[in-house]
Image (cartoon, grey):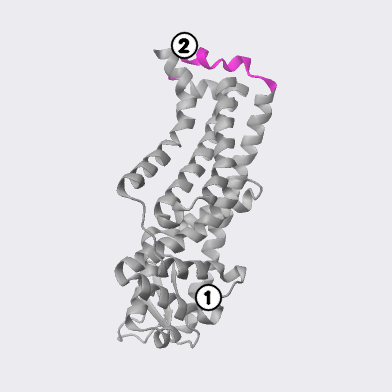
Amino acid sequence: MTVCLLLLSAVALTAAVPVPRALTRAAWPERDPVVALWVWQCLVATVLLCCLTALVLGTAAVFHTVRDHVFAPAPSAVTAAYDLSAAPIWAAGLTLLLACGAAWTTAMLARELVEARRRRGQARAHLRERAPDLPAGLPAARGPLLVLEDEYPDAWWMPGNPPQLIVTTGALHRLTDHQLDAVLTHERGHARARHDWLLHLSTALATGFPRIPLFAHFCDQTHRLVELAADDTASRRCGHLTTALALIELNQHRGVLSCASTHRLLGERVDRLLEPRPRLGPRHRALTTTVAALIPLLPLLITFAPGLTALS
């Protein structure tokens, strides 16, 4: 069991510290943000699986009742291969630390979901005030697209079932038909990919564990890559130039081309659309996706290796 815990710790530390820092310096995620999002999710899943399997092994070593339940269906040779009775003292401390981490992670995820639901409820109540229902007998005012009377040009999507697109009359007056189509396609890209769930997960982990590089980078990169992925969805349908012009027109009053840090992402998105780079080739894309999908299997392989060796 000691070897398993050490290997799991090594894999978790590698995936949590050096790999994310190297990934943030790489140039290819900007070329294919969808694949990059998948790689980040696989890294997070690897760390979480390492912690979960280490917690199970440590708990089984410390508590005999848990050990009996976990290894009840297994032959005696498998139980002996893990050598749970000779668990070192540091294993108990690691188990306690992992248990606290699991409880804290669950609390952060629950808090983020509750806060997101509260914010969504407030936003919907605000929309009902700004766009009241039509009298009975008239066509429904709401649907997949909701137009608000507002001189401020803006467009966004609100998660839900089904998700709703909101656009202001200021955006309708400022954008051409093709630019409006690009903006709405961008927002539909967010809705179809359910980027809201990914944003909630990354925000909860970064809030709960701000000093862990993986979770901090995961949050920052997720907020960036989902916008790039939605831009690609819009540019494939409406063209790179039209999407870039729509982004400029919709955000010109925000200083889209300024050097302020709060608007830097907007400028990067415009530059990326005006100077498109070739995406990853099919082989590189498939290879990267496959390798990333295999990484979360490492914790499971390490955990089950002693049992499989004993059976063979």
Report x, y in % for residue 77. Answer: 46, 11
Residue at the image position 45 percent from the left and 18 percent from the top: 307
Q: Amino acid at mark 2?
A: Ala
Q: Is residue 42 magenta?
A: no
At mark 1, the secondary structure is loop
Report x, y in % for residue 87. Answer: 63, 19
Circle 1 or circle 2, nearest the eye: 1
Location of the C terminus by quadrant is top left
**Where does label 2 land, which residue?**
77
Q: Who is closer to the viewer here, 270 or 102?
A: 270
Q: Who is closer to the viewer here, 27 or 262?
A: 27
Pointer 1 with pointer 2, Cβ within 8 A: no
Badge 1: few (under 14), some or many (20 or more) residues near its Cα, within 10 Å? many
Residue at the image position 59 percent from the left and 36 percent from the top: 13
Residue at the image position 31 percent from the left and 72 percent from the top: 238
Q: Which segment is the magenta one?
A: 73-89
Q: Amino acid at mark 1?
A: Val
Report x, y in % for residue 235. Answer: 35, 68
Q: Quadrant of residue 188?
A: bottom left
Q: In this rendering, would 142 be left or right of 298? A: left
Q: In this rendering, would 309 be left or right of 139? A: right
**Mark carried by residue 256:** 1
